[in-house]
């Protein structure tokens, strides 16, 4: 067992100098490969684009060694038709350049003269004295004498005359009707009292007198009520007469005022319409004159700038289309540089981690041998996250894994299918067919 454990001892750290030299060599190879891959020839119906090596270039690397890289020449060849087009294009471009040169020396002489806009129509900045800011004398701010604010002397603010005479007459008429009867009843009542032996001054005689007085009082109240009813009827009649007269006066005043208001509005609308018509005519005339000024200036500057625009178009060469091979841009192959130093260090760290993991797992396995026989499920179907840590000399692999039923706990051990090939007696199966490994027997018989 001790020899097997020594097989996975801590790996030796890489030499920095050797690593730097190897990194430089990898970088030079990467650059050369990338350049060669980018030299892609193109053949099109319009012409060809080819690369050919025409020499080499030598340089000294960071490690002091000499390195040689190829140099290439790119050659463009047009077919006969495209070549003829290019010749014509270049000839046309030469003619355009000559024309532009001639125009710049003679055709632009007008640009040397000062800008003269004296011939432009005058710009009108005012609408003149004819423009009115008020509607004129025909516009009225009052409704005139035809509009009334009062209803005249015929309008009554009080009504009715003295109705006390009618009141008194009605009351007296009622009392005149009741008094004879009341008098006869009073005399009869007194005579009956005397005949009954009741003398004046007695309580009974006094009570009878009170009754006679109450009858006169009730008659007077009735007369008063009748007089008040007559008085109210006369008052209502007078009120209705006054309201009828006032309503007639009010309707007449409203009719007259509406007529005055209609005339007032019509007169003012006519004044406003006349003012707006006159002002619109002046404004339209001013706009027309100013539009003429703007159009004149536009034409003037167009004519002045025309030679300059022609020269600019000639110098731009926009009218000339150059011949083309139809070739697309050469694809640029990008070969990533190799981080050899990082690869060496990563490999070393991985070996160190595997060694540490194996030593920890092996120590755990050997520690279990001191106790009772350890039999564990080692069937691959029951495990997840399986990762090989180390391959032992007898062919067994030491793995890190987690059981599916306990995914949070990390385990280290063998796989039953590999143990079965090396030590079949250490493998057994349960009633469901899942394989189990007797780790004590593996350690005694397989090592």
Image (cartoon, grey):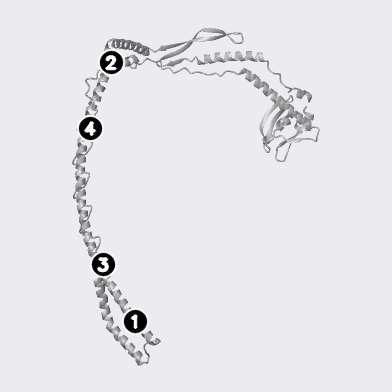
| Classed neighbour count for the residue bearing mark 1: other residues with Cα under 10 Å, few (<14), some (14–19), many (≥20) | some
| Residue to which mark 3 is pinned | 236
| Residues at discs 4 and 1 in contact (Cβ within 8 Å) | no
The reply to whether discs 1 and 2 touch (Cβ–Cβ < 8 Å) is no
Q: Dividing the image into 4 quarters, which one contains the N terminus?
A: top right
Q: Give the range drawn in magenta.
A: 211-216
The quadrant where residue 29 appears: top right
Q: Residues within 10 Å of mark 4 (few under 14, many from 20)?
A: some
- Mark in front: 4 vs 1: 1
Marks 4,2: beta carbons within 8 A: no
Lower sequence index among marks 4 and 3: 3
Q: How far apart are marks 1 and 3 (CA)?
A: 35 Å
Q: Residues within 10 Å of mark 3 (few under 14, many from 20)?
A: few
Judged from the image, the secondary structure of the residue bearing numbered disc 3 is helix
User: Spatial distance from mark 4 to mark 1, Cα to Cα?
Assistant: 101 Å
Label 1: state its secondary structure.
helix
Q: Nearer the viewer, mark 4 or mark 3?
A: 3
Q: Mark 4 points at which residue?
A: 283
Q: Percent from the top left, x then y, of residue 409? A: 69, 35
Q: Which numbered disc, 1 or 3, marks the residue that appears first in the sequence? A: 1
Q: Distance between the residues labelled 4 and 3?
A: 68 Å
Q: Classify mark 2: helix, strand or loop.
A: helix
Foreground residue among 309 and 380: 309
Name the front one of labels 1 and 2.
Answer: 1
| Residue 83 picture quarter | top left
Q: Which residue is pictured at 23% across the width and 63% down the height? A: 242
The CA distance from mark 4 to mark 2 is 38 Å
């Amino acid at each position: 067992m001790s020899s097997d454990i020594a097989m996975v001892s801590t790996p030796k750290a890489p030499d920095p100098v050797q690593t730097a030299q190897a990194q430089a060599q990898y970088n030079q190879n990467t650059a050369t490969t990338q350049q060669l891959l980018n030299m892609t020839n193109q053949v099109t119906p319009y012409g060809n684009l080819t690369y050919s090596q025409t020499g080499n270039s030598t340089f000294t690397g960071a490690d002091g060694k000499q390195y040689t890289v190829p140099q290439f020449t790119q050659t463009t060849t047009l077919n006969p038709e495209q070549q003829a087009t290019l010749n014509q294009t270049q000839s046309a471009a030469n003619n355009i350049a000559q024309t532009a040169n001639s125009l710049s020396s003679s055709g632009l002489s007008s640009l040397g003269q000062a800008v003269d806009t004296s011939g432009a129509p005058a710009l009108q900045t005012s609408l003149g004295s004819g423009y009115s800011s008020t509607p004129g004398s025909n516009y009225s701010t009052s409704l005139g004498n035809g509009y009334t604010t009062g209803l005249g002397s015929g309008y009554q603010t009080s009504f009715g005359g003295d109705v006390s005479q009618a009141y008194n007459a009605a009351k007296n008429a009622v009392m005149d009707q009741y008094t004879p009867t009341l008098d006869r009843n009073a005399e009869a009542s007194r005579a009956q009292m005397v005949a009954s032996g009741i003398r004046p001054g007695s309580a009974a005689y006094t009570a009878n007198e009170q009754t006679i007085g109450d009858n006169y009082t009730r008659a007077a109240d009735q007369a008063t009520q009748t007089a008040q009813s007559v008085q109210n009827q006369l008052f209502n009649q007078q009120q209705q007469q006054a309201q009828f007269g006032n309503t007639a006066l009010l309707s007449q005043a409203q009719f007259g005022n509406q007529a005055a208001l209609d005339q007032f509005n019509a007169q003012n609308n006519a004044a406003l319409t006349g003012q707006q018509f006159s002002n619109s005519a002046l404004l339209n005339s001013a706009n027309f004159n100013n539009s003429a000024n703007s159009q004149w200036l536009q034409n003037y500057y167009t004519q002045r700038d025309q030679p300059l625009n022609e020269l600019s178009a000639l110098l731009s060469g926009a009218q000339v289309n150059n011949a083309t091979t139809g070739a697309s841009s050469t694809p640029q192959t990008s070969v990533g540089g190799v981080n050899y130093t990082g690869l060496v260090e990563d490999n070393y760290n991985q070996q160190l981690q595997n060694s540490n993991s194996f030593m920890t797992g092996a120590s755990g396995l050997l520690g279990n041998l001191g106790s009772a026989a350890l039999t564990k499920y080692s069937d691959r179907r029951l495990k997840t996250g399986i990762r090989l840590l180390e391959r032992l000399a007898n062919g067994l692999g030491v793995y890190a894994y987690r059981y599916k039923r306990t995914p949070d706990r990390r385990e280290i051990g063998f796989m039953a299918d590999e143990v079965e090939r090396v030590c079949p007696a250490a493998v057994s199966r349960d009633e469901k067919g899942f394989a189990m490994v007797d780790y004590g027997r593996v350690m005694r018989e397989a090592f």
